[in-house]
Amino acid sequence: MLNFLIVISAAIPLAIAILYPAMGENITELAGVYNIGLEGIMLISAAVGFIVALYSHNLVYGVLGGVFTGVLVGVLLAFFALNIKADQIVFGLSLIIIGPFLSSFIAGYAPSGINTISVLPAVNLGNWAYPFNYIFNQSILVYIGFAMLAAIWYITSRTHFGLAMRATGEDPHVAASTGINVVVTRWICCIAGCAIAALGGIFVVFSLTGVWADNVTGGNGFIAIALLRVGGYRPQYVLLACLVYGFVDALQLTVQALRIFPYQFLEMFPYVVGIIALVVQGRFKIFPGPKSLGRPYVKGER
């Protein structure tokens, strides 16, 4: 029998695993930098975090190691996209290609036969009434994700830096004419965006599975890019899109366990829902993206 409490409880972490890379991509794209290499960033960061946690015997150090890896990738992205003016799509594709191989290489430094770690503890909600104590009995990274979403919403919509970020993504030359340092703004967004995206890979290993496996993120980086567009670059709508997707994914996992339908159809169901939503959003242009997305900024040239 289908238990919707189990589905809802499972949907939240599945949504957060996509929300992290979606939030990171939101920051970089609002500033006008296109980063399609989320999947590679997540895999590499998760592998580094896994190895650091194993050898330090400290999950917090593992999380910090993974985030620092995301920062380093963000520096590379900013350097190639902003200083060298390299093609942002090509750089992203290189991360997608290199990510699985490099992450497997890094994870290979784990002691022989060890591919598991302890997961981060859940927040203790024993004093809450049922079913809330069951549904919201989630990893600390879940609540950090929600807090980070609120912070990103506030920064992008209520602060001077958020205005500068959005202006840079719309028209960097107009933004520069008002005194905004376009390059510095984009550098900050690239580093912050990649660091947050790295948390998506870390979350999968440290909160969802506790196991390292090749391609452990399962394409969440690609799904995050799609759901970002469905949510129209607005944090609250991106969260809603991720929660719906997480619910559909949790539902198919639960129904799959009941063996009612062929599992192949159930596994592809969340992706079909994501594709349909993306097509509808693209067809009707509900939330157009930044006008200067992916275009290199050259001072004095339009």
Image: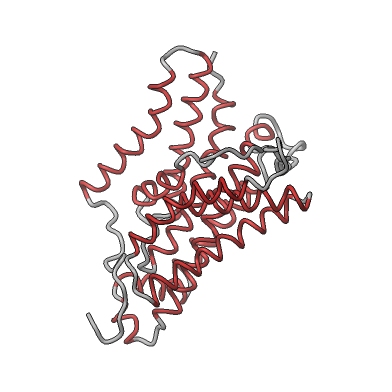
Q: Which residue sits at x=39%, y=46%? A: 227
Place of residue 253 in the rendered image (x, y in percent of width and height, measured from the top left): 51, 25
Tell me: residue 264, above or below residue 98.
above
Tell me: residue 134, above or below residue 185.
above
Residue 277 shown left or right of residue 126 in the figure: left
Q: Nearer the viewer, residue 38 or 98?
A: 98
Q: Which residue sits at x=53%, y=17%? A: 257
Place of residue 10 in the rendered image (x, y in percent of width and height, measured from the top left): 57, 32
Place of residue 209 in the rendered image (x, y in percent of width and height, measured from the top left): 62, 36
Residue 56 shown left or right of residue 170 in the figure: right
Q: Nearer the viewer, residue 174 or 103?
A: 103
Count of numbered marks: 0
Q: Nearer the viewer, residue 78 or 270?
A: 78
Tell me: residue 10, above or below residue 122.
above
Residue 181 shown left or right of residue 116 in the figure: left
Question: Within the image, what quadrant is residue 66 found in?
Answer: bottom right
Q: Nearer the viewer, residue 112 or 121?
A: 112
Q: How is the image coloured?
A: secondary structure
Q: Quadrant of the C terminus?
A: bottom left
Tell me: residue 176, above or below residue 70.
below
Question: Within the image, what quadrant is residue 69 found in?
Answer: bottom right
Place of residue 131 in the rendered image (x, y in percent of width and height, measured from the top left): 65, 30
